[in-house]
Image (tube, rainbow, N blue to C red):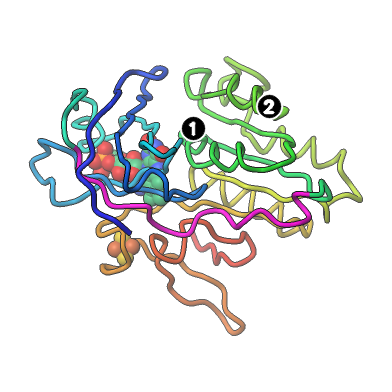
Amino acid sequence: MIQENTTVAEHHVFQGDYRLLRLSSPAIGPLVRPGQFVHLRVPRLADAILRRPFSVFKADAEGLSILYKSVGKGTAALCSVREGEAVNLIGPLGNGFPPITEKAKSGEMKPVLVAGGYGIAALYLQAAKLPVKGVAFFGGRSAADILCVDEFKALGWDVRITTDDGSLGQKGLVTVALDSWLAEQKGKFQTLEIFACGPNAMLKAVGDRAVQNGITAWLSMDRNMACGVGACLACVIKRKTADGWEWVRCCKTGPVFKAREIFWDE
Ligand SMILES: Cc1cc2nc3c(=O)[nH]c(=O)nc-3n(C[C@H](O)[C@H](O)[C@H](O)COP(=O)(O)OP(=O)(O)OC[C@H]3O[C@@H](n4cnc5c(N)ncnc54)[C@H](O)[C@@H]3O)c2cc1C
Ligand code: FES
């Protein structure tokens, strides 16, 4: 884990309420693994002591980018950050998606991505790294929340879209499309592996389906965070144990967990 004073290389509207922030980050950028996040201090925010966590959308030797939605005070302040400005980062943080297995390399495993809204940001690096491309389900409230379709198609993914209001793709929740597709995959569940990121309700719905059908699923959990490095316990979630559950820190042990490990009580 590194703390780095990075510089804003690029910052613009990506689509609707979503912005892309590219940071020159020669220390953190090259170390990032798919599914990891950075904890960013938002410049000019009155209570700047609290950083904000963002998945690393893309990363390379020179830097990294985040794809974010303005939802509150911190992200609204982030919108005003200008190119050339300094931004302090801690990262790369957390345990991302698991390393690529031999099964994945040989094509015995068929990967499935499920993304809700900005959850897509946590999945792009994994989507690029997986040697075999499968089906990617993207869900959002409306067309404006469906991001990066062409980029995922260009990587070789079969992208299926759902929107709550029917403005793009199939009308309904992302699980509507996932359920019909799963119904066609009966008998092949052992070969599927799901990677998902999005709102917690979506993650629970995807996780439940995976557990019921014996499919391995990896969920990138979204929790409000304070320290981001395992010191404050603001981000704890319940993980199943042999005789009940235990608290684990989403920032340190996660944010990616196996679906069958999560004890949902919300
Ligand atoms: C591991 C991780 C990766 C993330 N990656 C991304 C990303 O790639 N792109 C992106 O846009 N956002 C991402 N987020 C969410 C992002 O951190 C929050 O949207 C941000 O911290 C909100 O700050 P704010 O000050 O603007 O909102 P606040 O004023 O603090 O809150 C505004 C509203 O957003 C809710 N909120 C705040 N933090 C979170 C959170 N972590 N999850 C869900 N709701 C929250 C609050 O409850 C409130 O309703 C990620 C969160 C985590 C934990
Ligand atoms: S945010 Fe402090 S322990 Fe996770």
- Residue range in magenta is 87-105
Visible in this render: residue 179?
yes
User: How many residues crowd around disc 2 within 10 Å: few (fewer than 14), some, or many (20 or more)?
Assistant: some
In this view, 257 is above or below 148: below
Amino acid at pointer 1:
Gly
The Cα–Cα distance between marks 1 and 2, rounded to whole angstroms, is 14 Å
In this view, 149 is above or below 247: above
Residue 183 vs residue 200: left or right?
right
**Residue bearing the label numbered 2:** 159
At x 91% / y 51%, what residue is drawn? 187
Quadrant of picture, ligand 2: bottom left
Residue 143 in percent (x, y) is at: 53, 18
Q: Is residue 194 magenta?
A: no
Establish whether ligand 1 lies closer than 8 Å to the Cβ of label 2.
no
Contact flag, marks 1 and 2 (Cβ < 8 Å): no
Which residue is outermost to the top? 167
Question: Which of the two marks, 1 or 2, is nearer to us in this view?
Answer: 2
Establish whether ligand 1 lies closer than 8 Å to the Cβ of label 1.
yes
Residue 264 in percent (x, y) is at: 54, 62
Visible in this render: residue 234?
no
**Residue bearing the label numbered 1:** 117
